[in-house]
Structures are given as structure tokens and as C-alpha cells.
Amino acid sequence: MSEEVVFDLIVIGAGPGGYVAAIRGAQLGMKVAVVEKRSTPGGVCLNEGCIPSKALLDSSELFSLARDKFSLHGITVDAPGLDLAKMMSRKTDVVKKLTDGITFLLKKNGITRFEGVALLKGANGTGNQQVAVALAGETALISASNVILATGSDAAGLPGIPFDGELVVSAREALSFTAVPEHLIVAGGGVIGLELGSVWRRLGARVTVIEMLPNLLPTMDRQVAEQVSRSLRKQGIQFKLGTKITGLVKNGERGTVQFDGGNGTEELICDKLLVAVGRRPVTGSAGLAALGITLTKSGRVAIDEDYQTSVPGIYAIGDLVDGPMLAHKASEEGVVCVERMSGMKSLVEYDIIPGVVYTWPEAASVGQSEEQLKEGGVACQSGRFNFAALGRARCMDESEGFVKILADQETDRVLGVHIVGPRASDLIAEAVAVMSFNGTARDIGLTCHGHPTLSEAMREAALDLHKEAIHG
Amino acid sequence: MDIKIPEVGESVREALLAKWFKKNGDVVTRDEPLCEIETDKITLDLNADAAGVLTISAAEGTTLAVGTVIGAINESGTVAASPVVATAPVGVTEGTLPPTSPSVRRDMREQGIAPHQVTGSGKGGRITNEDLVTPVRETAPQTPVPPVAVIVPSVPVPPPAAPSVRSEEPPAYTSSRDERRPMTPLRKRISERLLAARQQTAMLTTFNDADLSRIKSLRSTYREHFIQRHGAPLGLMPFFVKACIEALKEFPLVNASIDGDDIVYHHYYDIGVAIGSEKGLIVPVLRDVDHLKLFEIDKAIAGFSEKIKTNRLAISDLEGGTFTISNGGVYGSMLSTPILNPPQSAVLGMHAIQDRAVVVDGQIVIRPMMYLALSYDHRIIDGREAVGFLKKVKEYIENPEELLLEG
């Protein structure tokens, strides 16, 4: 064991929470170390989540456009062929470029990287928190006055149907199939299930989504979720809602999934079962329990407003702590956690964190849904505009979806914006900005939007809220 | 029964709801203090007008217009339904707080400023980053404001140059070394008044000292008797009030004030007397003191002290006044220059009593001495009059029998 190296800040986990916290710490003058078990930084987000899935979503989108839409634009091509290996290597290339970018950023900010598995060892004689980093039999000992846990989450499995990496897979494997599955069954109608289901549906797989709840995307605005559901059905994805998977019988490379939707046990044969029923915080490793770090009822790490755990000097952010498991939420918390350590009065404004679903059409929302507002007894007004009536959307031949704006009845402040439609992921940014500035529906209505753009839908929806839509 | 922000003074239009002593749903009895209200002049308790169950509808720390309902007392005694205390976290739940941007919200947190403490200058009352640097002042009232009745003689007054502009941008994070807090409305008012007094008068101070031997011996001889007979402690202040009244009668300009191009002589003697409190010197006004006997003055001062302690001082107790007696001596000051309380033209500063060696009839003797300072507005009071006035006060203090015989 080598001599203990002392830092100001040790970040455990180099995902979107951890690496951002590390860089912010370095910017604020701290001597920072990052411990990461992967050989590349970026966590699940970059290596096996957001980025590779978007790379495949974009590739598969182009493929489906060439196959299904080109002819509508008067472009005649032979039926496009699929070189899946090349598509995957492009994805790998995208991931590599971005993880290399983060490696460079960490280096540029003078951050020391430790590859290996971290284990909290408790406070040493000087009051610093010690961390042991184990890699291939070697152990390095480092310590710092502040340690941030940013170990993220991993995929939850189905009871009785463990992951096997071949037939029963998580999102990680579903991003690297070497062949298009014949029949992909997706357990879980949440964001991950719908996105990956979309990828493989576009590339030709038969896709069935089995969801236990009666609705898809349970946290989204109902109208948005219904529109997504309609669009995906049109694309040929089949849904079995309110249905529970009860078992799996393996038969060589195939399996028979048993499920119960209220009419007794039914069966479907598949060659891949993607389990996307949620994610669990990684609290089992790193020695959290040995140190007595308290967890919440839901199994996340309990923290105070400074993100400090029950053990002074140890902090936790991202998927480990309460809130939506989103990369940008983790990054926000990373920055705020470090800034608060430095005495700044930073705050994550949890009410205005956007959420995006990269199906096509995309769905995105920020703030509260109409259902939440009703439940909270908030009197609000709603404005809506359909992309079908929008010039740019028509040009793109993307007429599904709408923008819905919810504003306080009295003050007109925007309380929620829900978009389903082309490039909703980018359009939502305007809504987040307006809400961050406590803006009103009138503010959006009075703001000039370029023509012809998709963003005009936002303005028209705001105008509609006051029954002043020009094109509504 | 609704609880409202009360009328606390003629020029007071809003008040800060500083603190609730009671919780939502608490059972309160009549006259029990419910909350503390802070205006730019005083802090006072709001007491229950009836017994019953309290419902709170305005949160602590909000500034509210006079007459605003801040809660209610349900006299039938049934427990009020759901608590409706306005909470004000960030983002969409901000309700009626003025609109702000993310950077403004962070700056306000850094500087400990609550949104309602700033008047937003942007569209729809939006608080801009500039508003935090130079808070927008309320438009000045048309009628002259009655003088704020708090003076702190030895407080260093900031130079007139750009008083509310920061000298430099606060560094990114220095909270361990510096801490920024907004001034309370009371403090803000004091600072504005003190600065105005400096800038709008030709203030000058003259000094003298007085031998308090006789007053001391009078007090020790008659104190017990005085307490028994009048229930008043026979303090030092009543002697000074009396002495000043007599001197003011001889020098009426010292009791006068300037109004535009006119000099207004006051044929009454309303004297502000400094009383030390937790919140600094408070200066309630004794009315028509020339008609009061020594013990009556003493009792009136004791009454004010009690009111200050129990937060019951009314704005009307602080308004007006034709002359002020301040007392840096309560804090042990040997000598200081009191600051005027416009539109008054003069203020007498009392100080600590110290045994000093003085020459009396060619002999060096030890006497309990006090330095006296008279700050005056040189625009209407000439040096000769100021010095004469102070000498007269000295004489009466050194020979209190004369006061007693005459008054």
C-alpha cells in the first residue's frame, strides 16, 4: 500500500454528476481526485445510456426515414440496407469522442484520476475521510476533507427473472445487439423502454411493450403520454398495459414470456427480453453501510440541504439521492453541492428540471402536469397548439403532437409546459428559460419567434391560453 | 375577527411582519401578543383583540400595507381548517413574489435579501440584478416626514458620496470573511435620517461641563422620600429637562425650526429624551414639559422605558418634538457630538459622570463632572446664543435649587 495522498475533494464516480462536481471543485480552487471503476469517464450516461441510445436513435431514425419517408418527398431509392455492425461502431465512436473529451477536461482542470473501485474507510487521524481505491490487487489510499458519492444507479431486474446478458438484458446490452431481434419484448413502458423499443422497431424488430401500470410514461402529462402512445402504436409497437410479467421459460436462444393482463396467463415468444422497469441507486458498494450512512425509506442516500449524508464530510448526489434519475439533475446537484461546500448559496431549482423522452415524436416537459396542478388545487389556464397547423412542421412532414402551456389563473405565471412533437427536446429549453425567469404566458406571447420554425408552436400555445392564437 | 396591520403613524403605509409568536391553530387569549410588526420607525407587538383560535394568513418576513389582513381569530374556538401559511420556495410555487431570474435569486440568497425587500424595477415588478445593487427607493412622500425619533449620537455617519452603492462587486464566495445582510426598515430609516441631518443643516457643536455635586446630593437626600411619595426614582434626566426648558425660554431660537424661508417659533416645549434600549437609543417625546412637575417628568420617562421594554411604544410617542436631549452617557461616552433631529434646531448631549479634579475658589477639588455638548443648526442659531444657552443649562444643573425655586 502506497502512502496516503491528500486532496481537498474526492469524487467517487465520474458520471454526469461526479465529473461535473470535480470540474466545478477544481474551478473553485480545490485539489480534486476522481475515482471511477470504468476505464472511461462519463458514467452510465455516456457509456451505456443517454449518449449511445441517442446515437442509435438518430441512426435508426435516418434508416426509417430512408425506408418510409423518402418516397413521400419524391426521393426514390432502393430499399435501404442495414449494416448494423457499422451503425454500432459509429455509436461506439461517438461515445469514445465524448469520453475522450471528458478525460481531456479532467486533465485540463488538474484533476487526479484513480481507476478502480472505491471503498470508504472512515475518518483518519486528521479528520479527513479516507478512501481506498482497489484496482487489480493494488490498493491506493487517498483522503480528503470532503468526499462526494456519485456512484449512480443500475438497472433493476424483474423478480424471478434475473439478467443473463443474452436473452434477459438491460439497456446496456440492448444498445449493443449484434443482430436485429426478431421479437423484442420490453418490460416497462417508461422512458428507457420506449426509447430502445423505438430503436429496434425502426430497425425492423417486432416490439411488444408490457407495462404493469395502466398508462405509459406515468410521470408525464396524460395528454402527452397518450399522444406518444398513439404515435408509437402507429409505428407498429404493440402495448400490453396493466399487465404483469409472471414468468419466463427459456428455450435455447428464445424464451416464452408469461404475463397476466387480467385474463389469465398468456404467453409470447421472444428472442430478447429487455427489462427496463426502473433503476436502483448503487448503495451496496463503497462501504456506505459500514460507515453508517443513513438511507431513506425509498433506499436512496439521505442528505441534508448541503447534500451531506449522515456522516459529516461525505456527500451524495445524483441517482443516489431522491429525485428523478436524470443526468442533468445529477450535474446540477454536483455543481451546487461543491459550491455550497465553498460557502456559496447555490440551490438546485427542482421545480424546473426538464424531462425528455426521445421517441419520435419526442416528448418533453417541465414544471407541473395538468393532473398535478388539479390535485394541488391550483387554478390554472391551459393553452394548446397542434403542430399540424404549423408551417415548419408541415414542411418536415411531422404533424403529430402539440405544445401545451399551463399558467396560473391569476398571475399568468407559467407553471408547466408539455410538448410532444418534432424536436420537443430542444423546444423545451425556451419553456425552462421562461419558467426560470418566473415568466408568464403573456411573456411568451409577446416574444417574437422566428418564422417558419417549430418554436412558433410555443408562442401560439401561449396566445391560445388567452384565446388570442393567430393560427389556432 | 380579522387581524390587520394596524395604523401606526400618519406617514407609515407598510410594515414588516417580523415574527409570529404564535403558530397557526394556536389558541390565544385576549391581549396576548400575537406577532411583532416592524415599521421604519418602531417595532411593536400586535396583541389579540379577542380570545379564540388563531389562523395565520401572512408569512413572517413579508412587508404588508397598513390594513392588510394577516390572520384571523376564530372566537367560537373551533380549530381552523388547514394551515394556509404562505410558503415561498423557489420556482413555480412562488405565488405572489415578484418575478426574478436565476442569477438574481442566487444573488439574493448570497446577500440574504428576501424578494419582498426589494422593489423590482423591471417589467411587471421584475427584480433585476441592478435592483440588488441600488435598491429602488420608495417615492418620497409629499408632506414633510415627522422626525424619526431614534438618534444614536456617536454613530459614525457614512460620507455623503454614493452611500448605497457598493464600492466593489462582492467576490465569488467570501462568506467566511464577510457577511451581507439587508438593513431592517428601522435601520434604513435611521441611516437616511442621519445622513439627511448632516447634509441639510449647518451643524456645529459647542461644549461645556457641569459639576453635578449638588444634584447628586439632592438625589441622595430625597430619593427615598421621592420614591415613596411619587413612585418615581428621581432620575438625572428630569433635572436636565427642567434646566433645558428654562434655558429654552431664555433662548427661543434654540426651540425654533426652519420651514422654507421662515423661522417657526414654538410656544410649547416638547422635549425628546433619549432612552437606551436593545435596539439603540429611542427618543420618545415629552409633551408640554413646561407644565410638568419634576416627579411627573420622572414618571413619564419611566413610563416610556416600560413601553419600550414591552414593545408598546406608539408612533405618536415618537413624533414631533421641538428639542432633544440625548445621552451618550448611558453607554459611558465621555464626550461626543450629538446629531440633529431635523426639523429641530438643537440637541443637547449628556455624557458619563466622572470624578475629576477641578479648581473651585483657587482650590483643586474632586467633583463629579459631566461634559455637555450642544449641536445646533448654525443657520438660525448664532454661536453667541448657543454658547449662552449651554452656559445657562450648566448653571441650572450646577445650582438646581434655582430651578426648583422658579419651577
Image (spheres, rainbow, N blue to C red):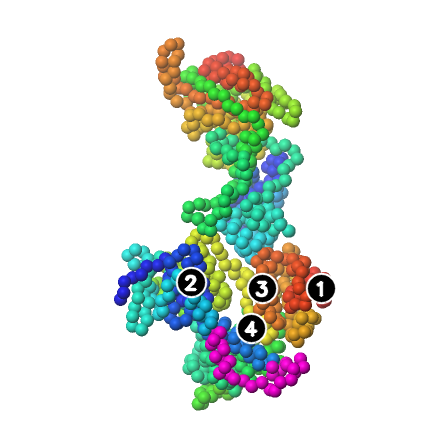
- Return the residue nearer the eye: B324 or A345: A345
Which amino acid type is marked by label 3? Answer: Ala
Which amino acid type is marked by label 4? Answer: Tyr
Q: Could you tell me how far apart the alpha carbons at marks 2 and 4 are, in whole angstroms? A: 32 Å
- Are the residues flagged by discs 2 and 4 in contact, CB closer than 8 Å? no
Foreground tag (3 vs 1) = 3
Q: Which residue is mark 3?
A: A429
| SS category of the residue bearing label 4 | loop
Q: Could you tell me how far apart the alpha carbons at marks 2 and 3 are, in whole angstroms? A: 29 Å
Q: Which residue is mark 1?
A: A469
As drawn, B96 above or below B343: below
As drawn, A232 above or below B18: below
Which amino acid type is marked by label 2? Answer: Lys
Foreground tag (2 vs 3) = 2
The chain identifier of the residue carrying mark 3 reads: A
Foreground tag (1 vs 2) = 2
Query: Which of the two labelled residues, at mark 2 and mark 3, occupies the earlier sequence position?
Result: 2
The numbered dot on residue A358 is 4
Query: Which of the two labelled residues, at mark 1 and mark 2, occupies the earlier sequence position?
Result: 2
